[in-house]
Amino acid sequence: MIINKVIAYKSIVFASIMVVLTISCAKKVASASESDPWKNMELTIKTLPQTKFQDKTYNINDFGAVADGKTLNTLAFEKAIKTCAENGGGKVLVPNGKYLTGAIHLESNVNLHLEDHAEILFSLNPKDYPIVHTSWEGTEVMNYSPLIYAKNKTNVAVTGKGTLNGQADSTNWWIWSGGKGYGWKKGIPSQNDPANREVLVDMAEKNIPVSERIFGEGRYLRPNFIEFFECNTVLVKDITVINSPFWILHPIKTNNIIIDGVTVNSHGPNNDGCDPEYSQNVIIKNCTFNTGDDCIAIKAGRDADGRRVAIPSKNIIVQNCKMIDGHGGVVIGSEISAGVNNVFVENCVMDSPNLDRAIRIKTNSKRGGVIENIFVRNLEVGTVKECVLLVTMFYNVYGSQTGNFIPTVRNINLENITVKNSGKFGVLAEGYPESPIENITLKNVKIEKADSVYSLKNVKNINFINTYINGKKVNK
């Protein structure tokens, strides 16, 4: 009995010591993460689940596909994907050649793989894109299906060195934007007509159910190109994407996605290269973006719809990418109402006279939201038009964008960055008196040429550490 009591006592003591050690280790890990937030990035990378597929191949030609660039192959894609999924998954192979199709809907455990000289041409007939639950500029809607679409799927991929060609130009999808530079003229219907974009936004403000926000034909809201909606464990690798109707890579409410080695070359209106929205644990690496809008734009819903969904985008990692033309290299916003945090950008090259900014954060008092913990390091910036870092709480587009939801923006860190020409400013930041932008740090930043060092309005605690602009050390 005494021996048992001694053993029990020793067990309790040992357990207590282990609890103390566990708590101590946890505190040390937390402390290390706080002192070096990049460890959080490394942990996300290390723990991210990877796609894995059966070693089975389903060639779309065996399901009736014709590689003449003219025959509509929508049914062949559908049959191949369905058969692959029903048999436990694998690779749906698109062989070399040109294949015309309407919307492609993916299934779980399916890898849509393009051979090196395969090209999928997407139909210009809106009727080839059925109405699905999707999103448009940060507002959920029943609208034209994205060209490639997956909803509520797990373990899904689009891979291979072939080309996805949306065939959009100023004679078809792009004209719907209402932009004169994209073929629109007075009298041509567009998304800007009273019954279209603003009606959707108004529906969301009134909390009308998404199932009743039915758009599509006659409403001129262009479809996204590749959209993963409420998916988990996704891979997009090596493909080239050109001529998109609208946003190009759009993971929404999707977790654990890797976008690797993708080339985007599309200069149409709203042709953002990649827009993670309400998404978490996203890695974008080894990609090239040459776009008509933001290269990468991290989103989190627009206005009331974003606050309804209330899922922040977080743990977004951008590595070893090249940004050419675009409104910004890595951008956060403007559809940002649910908030964004823990963004890591490293080892990227940004350079073009048609690239407006390197890092851009844009929000306003209709969007609201909390944007925090943005970490950027090891950038090589050639030429940008306006500035290296732009942070604004007064982003206005499509009319008045003011409301009662004052944003919070804090903790922005740029380190080890070289810039040849930053255009008008090194840093441009503007907040509200009641909600100043807090904690901006530039460390080891060298900007060879800028018209002005900075323009700051309602910014609290900005630090320049070993930072030089126009050959002079910056002090503030």
Image (tube, rainbow, N blue to C red):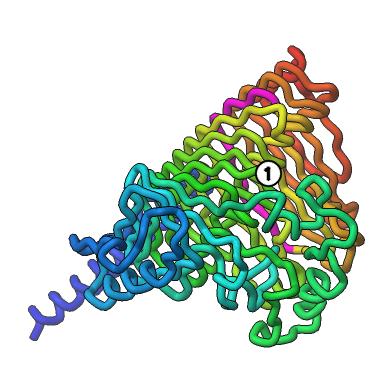
Residue at 76% from the left image edge and 32% from the top image edge = 387
- Location of mark 1 (residue): 292
Element under disc 1: loop
132 with respect to 173 (left or right): left
Residue at 87% from the left image edge and 53% from the top image edge = 432
Residue 49: x, y in percent?
34, 60
| Quarter containing the C terminus | top right
Range drawn in magenta: 369-383
Amino acid type, mark 1:
Gly
Q: Nearer the viewer, residue 28 or 394?
A: 394
Q: Is residue 411 visible?
A: no
Residue 120: x, y in percent?
44, 54
| Quarter containing the N terminus | bottom left
Q: Nearer the viewer, residue 23 or 91?
A: 91
Q: Is residue 223 magenta?
A: no
77 with respect to 84 (left or right): right
